[in-house]
């Protein structure tokens, strides 16, 4: 290792005490590096901190390292040249609670250092090493100081004590903005300060870099972790036209820190391995595409109704003056599923009429004709009948039950009888459709959202439905309230996780054992299509044996270590395509009922798409332009490029060709997503591919229009295309009441007329007071046997759920629609559109609605439920104003009030505002200061 010292002789003559420390430090680094055996570096700590050091520092310097997920006992430190303990041990298993404080560990660490080992510590990691205490006297001998605290004072940055050291590192002698989650050491003992936090007025504030010598080794302590410092620096520069990352001032600071840490690590003479790096260039090389699309159908006709009520046929009485005049009939053979459905029908009719309708077992002796079912049983002779029928009963009633298609819904009025039946999930949908015909509705999950109208007389209108839901797969993901993200959100708000999740899960149904809102609305499937990001294990399986199967990164390497469960692939690899085909054939063999299996690419993660020459030759130069995001060793940057749709299709076609040679009639699922969302310009998809289009949102009208057309282009190939948008998470950073239900309803029917094969709506955040009407209308679009229009569904929602206040609630929803529409035009943020004048108008509507609902507790409670959404939006408006005005005191006050409001609402209306999703996504709750 060589060191450059400018004007060395003169510097030595004039060197003060601090300079002597630096000089000895440098001599030590030289001597140590050549005096001990080369071994790898051990990285131990919270995952993002150690991954940042590995990618940004060690790999760049070709230094071998290992990220350890388990606590490394000090007795095993000798296996490594350098021990790097980063930030905290949150992701480390088996941590010794006493840290280094046990006599055996103290001795082991001392021995490692005396023998020439190097230990690098960052930030608050010393707390754990000291046994979980801020008082570090127990390990003072090892680290050289007694106390560590948070540094809350704002600093100008970090400056080295001696001007010689920056020159040795190859950086300028200036102040560096190395402010992250800073800590400071005090009561220094044997530790020596190499760099300080400084302030323009007061000078040195606290140590930033300390070294403590013990025998041949040293302990270095950095006040902030590498990851946190890069995070605080923000944008570090931008790429030029050739893909070179040009550093700005912050980037220069980041690069200087990288050199400092590299310098410290190399003092331990770590094992290095020269790595062959490939050329990385961001320029498409594919020939021009000339793919022609057939004429796109833009028809948005409304599908014909499955049945139209025959008004000339009188309704069938079920209850008269709260006395039943009908019975529910179930099969004689025991059927838990049909009995449960019959009990659900009974529960609703009993609650509607304040009655007790009976359930009878079917008797083959009863006569059936065009007049209906003639019940002979004593007290029920001459009663009308609701027959919950299986195929056997349907056959006996001569209704050809065995001919029902999968998921078929069968509802038929015959004289004094209504037959409720279906195939598979269809019978449940039939029962809930029947109850809706009686006037029941399910506006949102829970008892408050269930509408069961009270009436002394209950009549069933004429019914004649025999059809399956149009889509084989109908999906609105219900969200996982216990997931990592919502749990972190609840904690950020200050809501008790266990209590809230208990309340939330209880509200998912309106009665114990009852089906969910989603089942009531007809969500479900009749074919087993599988999809989802599907290469999460590939780096673990093939990273060592076939690194060439993975995406070339800007550093010239193909490592996916920093994002091993979201690895990116080299889609030009024929061998990789063969391996994927082999894996999918095995999956089909293990899942013979699967209609499709997934070859959907991974998303997210810290690695980028492949830019090797072979992959770039798959990208037509005339593909739609876009920006791709990449990560250099220290920063993310964006580069102009073209859509990767043709590349993804070429790879997918190769897999499909191999699979379809051995299995016919099955599909491979592929996302049309991210930078491969636009339709191809060159490659036509293999017939065995099915697509899930992740697009069409409602925050930008221009994008919505473009993506709707793109969906129809994808469907024009004749491959099945599912709609799998994230649009229900619209404006998720701002928790505002909104209404784009009309748009989503219209788009659903437009896509249905243009090849829509199924749906999978993600990002439903369970904020029913903010978006509940959108969720409701979307569900109704999936199962709408009478082909009601949006306006008919809007009227029905308001009248059914809010009674005498229906006009005010309708206007409230219409005004929210106007706000959402204006925000989607793009000129203003939704926080600007949702101003004080609109808030006042919306409040007035709900005030008037509450007045009209006086005397009916259910209507009043539903209005109060909706009002929580308006109050939530008002808090966000106040926070938006305070942030823009940089009013710190007002901002902090409103954040606290917002949190308290969310906590109160979680207790009274768990479904109204999901503290987990809001806490995770809301931008104001993430920012302690404006």
Image (cartoon, grey):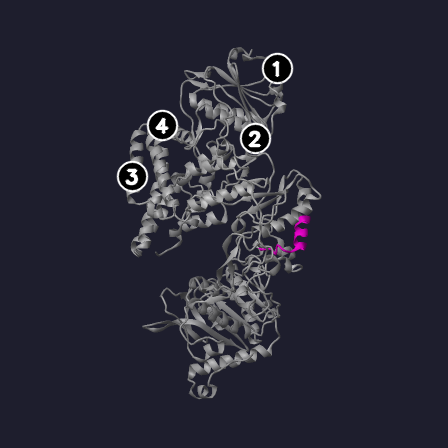
Q: What distance separates the C-alpha of mark 4 from that of mark 1?
A: 44 Å
The numbered mark, 1 or 2, whose residue comes first in the sequence reads 1
The numbered mark, 1 or 3, whose residue comes first in the sequence reads 1
Mark closer to the observer (1, 3): 3
Q: Nearer the viewer, residue 656 or 867?
A: 656
Q: What distance separates the C-alpha of mark 2 from that of mark 3?
A: 44 Å
Q: Could you tell me which residue is drawn at 48 percent across and 76 percent down?
A: 170
Let me know if residue 574 is in the magenta part: yes
Q: Which residue is mark 1?
A: 364
Q: Which residues are magenta?
A: 567-582
Q: Nearer the viewer, residue 219 or 346?
A: 346
Q: Which residue is mark 4?
A: 803
Q: Could you tell me which residue is drawn at 47 percent across and 78 percent down?
A: 167
Q: Nearer the viewer, residue 558 or 350?
A: 558
Q: Which residue is mark 2?
A: 425
SS of the residue at dot 4?
helix
Query: Mark 1 packing: few (<14 Cα in 10 Å), some, or many (20+)?
Result: few
Quadrant assignment for the C terminus: bottom left
Q: Which residue is mark 3?
A: 841
Let me know if residue 20 is in the magenta part: no
Number of marks drawn: 4
Mark closer to the observer (1, 2): 2
């Amino acid at each position: 290792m060589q060191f450059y010292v400018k004007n060395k002789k003169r510097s030595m003559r004039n060197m003060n005490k601090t300079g002597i420390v630096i000089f000895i430090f440098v001599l030590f680094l030289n001597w140590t590096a050549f005096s001990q055996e080369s071994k790898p570096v051990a990285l131990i700590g919270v995952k993002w901190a150690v991954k940042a050091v590995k990618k940004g520092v060690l790999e760049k310097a070709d230094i071998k390292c290992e990220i350890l997920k388990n606590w490394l006992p000090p007795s095993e430190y000798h296996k490594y040249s350098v021990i790097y303990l980063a930030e905290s041990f949150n992701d480390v298993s088996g941590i010794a609670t006493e840290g280094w404080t046990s006599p055996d560990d103290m001795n082991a660490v001392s021995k490692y250092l005396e023998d020439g080992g190097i230990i690098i510590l960052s930030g608050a990691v010393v707390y754990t090493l000291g046994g979980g205490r801020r008082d570090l006297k127990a390990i003072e001998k090892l680290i050289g100081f007694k106390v560590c605290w948070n540094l809350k004072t704002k600093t100008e940055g970090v400056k080295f004590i001696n001007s010689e050291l920056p020159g040795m590192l190859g950086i300028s002698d200036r102040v560096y903005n190395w402010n992250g989650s800073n800590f400071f050491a005090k009561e220094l003992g044997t530790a020596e300060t190499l760099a300080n936090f400084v302030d323009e007025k007061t000078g040195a504030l606290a140590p930033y870099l300390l070294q403590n010598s013990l025998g041949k080794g040293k302990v270095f302590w950095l006040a902030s972790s590498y990851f946190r410092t890069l995070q605080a620096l923000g944008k570090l520069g931008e790429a030029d036209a050739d893909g070179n990352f040009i550093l700005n001032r912050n980037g220069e600071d980041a690069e200087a820190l990288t050199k400092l840490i590299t310098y410290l690590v190399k003092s331990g003479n770590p094992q290095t391995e020269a790595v062959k790096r490939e050329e990385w260039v961001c320029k498409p090389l594919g020939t021009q595409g000339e793919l022609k699309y057939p004429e796109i159908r833009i028809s948005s006709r409304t599908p014909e109704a499955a049945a139209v009520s025959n008004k000339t046929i009188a309704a069938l009485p079920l209850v008269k003056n709260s006395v039943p005049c009908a019975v529910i009939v179930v099969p004689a053979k025991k059927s838990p599923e049909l009995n449960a459905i019959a009990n659900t029908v009974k529960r609703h009719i009993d609650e509607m009429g304040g009655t007790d309708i009976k359930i009878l077992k079917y008797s083959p002796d009863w006569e059936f004709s065009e007049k209906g079912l003639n019940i002979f049983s004593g007290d029920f002779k001459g009663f009308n009948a609701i027959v919950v029928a299986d195929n056997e009963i349907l056959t006996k009633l001569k209704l050809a039950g065995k001919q029902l298609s999968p998921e078929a819904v069968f509802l038929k009025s015959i004289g004094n009888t209504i037959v409720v039946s279906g195939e598979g999930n269809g019978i449940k949908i039939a029962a809930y459709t029947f109850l809706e015909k009686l006037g029941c509705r399910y506006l949102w999950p829970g008892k408050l959202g269930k509408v069961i109208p009270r009436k002394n007389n209950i009549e069933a209108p004429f019914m004649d439905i025999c059809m399956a839901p149009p889509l084989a797969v109908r999906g609105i993901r219900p969200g996982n309230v216990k997931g990592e993200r919502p749990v972190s959100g609840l904690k950020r708000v200050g809501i008790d996780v266990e209590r809230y999740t208990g309340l939330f899960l209880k509200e998912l149904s309106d009665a114990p054992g009852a089906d969910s809102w989603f089942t009531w609305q007809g969500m479900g499937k009749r074919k087993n299509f599988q999809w989802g990001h599907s290469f999460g294990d590939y780096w673990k399986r093939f990273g060592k044996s076939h690194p060439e199967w993975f995406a070339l990164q800007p550093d010239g390497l193909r490592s996916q270590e920093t994002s091993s469960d979201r690895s990116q692939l080299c889609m030009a690899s024929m061998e990789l395509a063969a391996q994927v085909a082999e894996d999918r054939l095995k999956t089909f063999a293990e899942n013979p009922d699967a209609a499709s299996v997934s070859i959907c690419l991974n998303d997210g993660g810290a690695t980028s798409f492949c830019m090797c020459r072979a992959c770039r030759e798959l990208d037509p130069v005339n593909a739609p332009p876009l920006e791709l995001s990449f990560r250099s060793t220290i920063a993310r940057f964006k580069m102009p490029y073209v859509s990767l749709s043709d590349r993804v299709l070429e790879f997918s076609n190769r897999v499909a060709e191999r699979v379809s040679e051995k299995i016919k009639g099955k599909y491979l699922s592929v996302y049309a997503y991210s930078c491969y969302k636009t339709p191809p310009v060159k490659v036509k998809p293999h017939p065995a591919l099915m697509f899930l289009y992740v697009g069409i949102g409602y925050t930008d009208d221009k994008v919505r229009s473009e993506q709707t057309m793109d969906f129809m282009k994808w469907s024009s190939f004749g491959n099945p295309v599912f709609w799998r948008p994230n649009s229900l998470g619209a404006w998720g950073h701002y928790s505002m009441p909104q209404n784009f239900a009309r748009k989503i309803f219209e788009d659903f029917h437009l896509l249905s007329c243009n090849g829509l094969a199924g749906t999978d709506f993600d990002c439903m955040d369970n904020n029913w007071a903010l978006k509940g009407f959108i969720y409701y209308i979307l569900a109704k679009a999936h199962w709408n046997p009478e082909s009601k229009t949006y306006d008919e569904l809007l009227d029905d929602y308001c009248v059914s759920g809010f009674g005498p206040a229906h006009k005010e609630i309708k206007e409230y929803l219409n005004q929210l629609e106007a706000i959402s529409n204006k925000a989607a035009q793009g000129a203003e943020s939704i926080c600007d559109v949702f101003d004080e004048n609109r808030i006042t108008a919306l409040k007035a509507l709900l005030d008037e609605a509450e007045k009209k609902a006086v005397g009916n507790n259910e209507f009043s409670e539903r209005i109060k439920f909706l009002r929580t959404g308006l109050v939530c939006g008002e808090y966000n408006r106040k926070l938006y104003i305070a942030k823009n005005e940089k009013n710190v005191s007002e901002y902090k006050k409103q954040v606290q009030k917002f949190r308290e409001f969310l906590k109160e609402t979680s207790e009274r209306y768990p479904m109204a505002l999901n503290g987990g999703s809001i806490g995770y996504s809301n931008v104001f709750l993430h920012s302690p200061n404006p």
